[in-house]
Amino acid sequence: MTTIDTHDQSHRQSVARRLLDSSETLSYDPVREVDWETPLDTAHHGASPEWSTLFGTSYWNEMTPEQQRELTRQEAASVASTGIWFEMILQQMILRDFYAKDPTDPAFQWALTEIADECRHSIMFARGAAKLGAPAYRPKRHVVELGRVFKAVAFGEAAYAAILVAEEVLDVMQRDWMRDERVAPFVRTINNIHVVEESRHMKFAREETKARLRGAGRLRKQVNALVVAIAAYHIVTSMVSDQVYANAGLDTKRALREAKANEHHRSMLRSSCAGLMEFLDSCGLLTRPATHFYKRANLI
Ligand SMILES: [Fe+2]
Ligand SMILES: [Fe+2]
């Protein structure tokens, strides 16, 4: 082992140890922390209205405040449901990544801690979506099947950078929602729990992405940059299901048309991803083909 490898290794271990300490100090049990008992008050939004896919469109302006709130509740439930879908993917990727590795390594123990966090998050999101009065929202069939392949084969920087993208996009929205008094209190608690625990996951995903890339050749980098961008595209475009509009009592065709052309929503996404894109660029993962997909997903 060279000196650099030893240095990398001890850096990774000290990061993992700090993450373990932090999670010991501040972690949540959503079963106890979230108010599941109080019935849903429909005077509340499910998300900050500015994050609605229709905010700023003429359709939005024609809607009653009740309809707007119903829409953001369905949208928040859809984002949570897509979150569950992705958390299942990432749990499997991390579990595969650490299969039969050294259990005395703090990174190994951190990986299992992160999987445990995600497991609690998914249950929390499932209960939250149900409380918001939403049906099961799932990505489109071909996206579900792509995810099935991705979670079975993605490795190294492709896995950790994809994890990072999903977590970062969610993070910015949830930071807004958790502070917003128009949002239902139980949703704010859910978002607060998620933001706190995910900040550790994002730290780990950044470290792992950088570490795995250190040994990667040009071709592998090019391929994985594209894989991550395609994964990001499908994650982001699956966040709000096409079905939310009908469930909020809206005309799906018109809603989809106006949401697609909604420049306000696109700029919210773009500005929330600025830091993430900077990071991917610094890692050499913002190749031209990858940038094409980030543009299509309105992340850049
Ligand atoms: Fe999570
Ligand atoms: Fe996470």
Image (cartoon, helix red, strand yellow):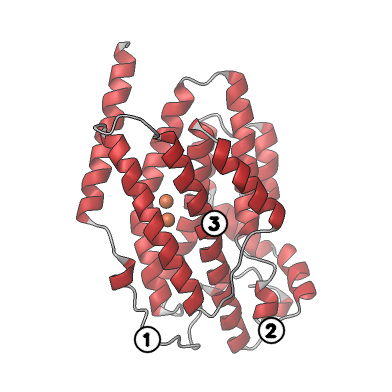
Residue type at mark 1 is Thr
Which residue sits at x=27%, y=44%? Answer: 19
Q: Position of residue 132 (x, y in %)?
A: 50, 78
Which residue sits at x=52%, y=46%? Answer: 165
- Along the line of sight, which residue is nearer the eye, 140 or 291? 140
Separation of disc 2 and disc 3 at Cα? 25 Å
Res 249 label: 2
Give the number of the mark in front: 3 or 1. 3
Residue type at mark 2 is Gly
- Residue 300 in sight in this render: no
- Residue 30 sits in quarter: bottom left
Residue identifier under label 3: 85
Tell me how many marks there are: 3
Res 38 label: 1
Q: Position of residue 98 (x, y in %)?
A: 39, 35
Q: Is residue 80 above or below residue 132?
A: above
**Of callouts 3 and 1, which one flags the residue occurring earlier in the amino acid sequence?**
1
- The yes-or-no answer for disc 3 within 8 Å of ligand 1 is no
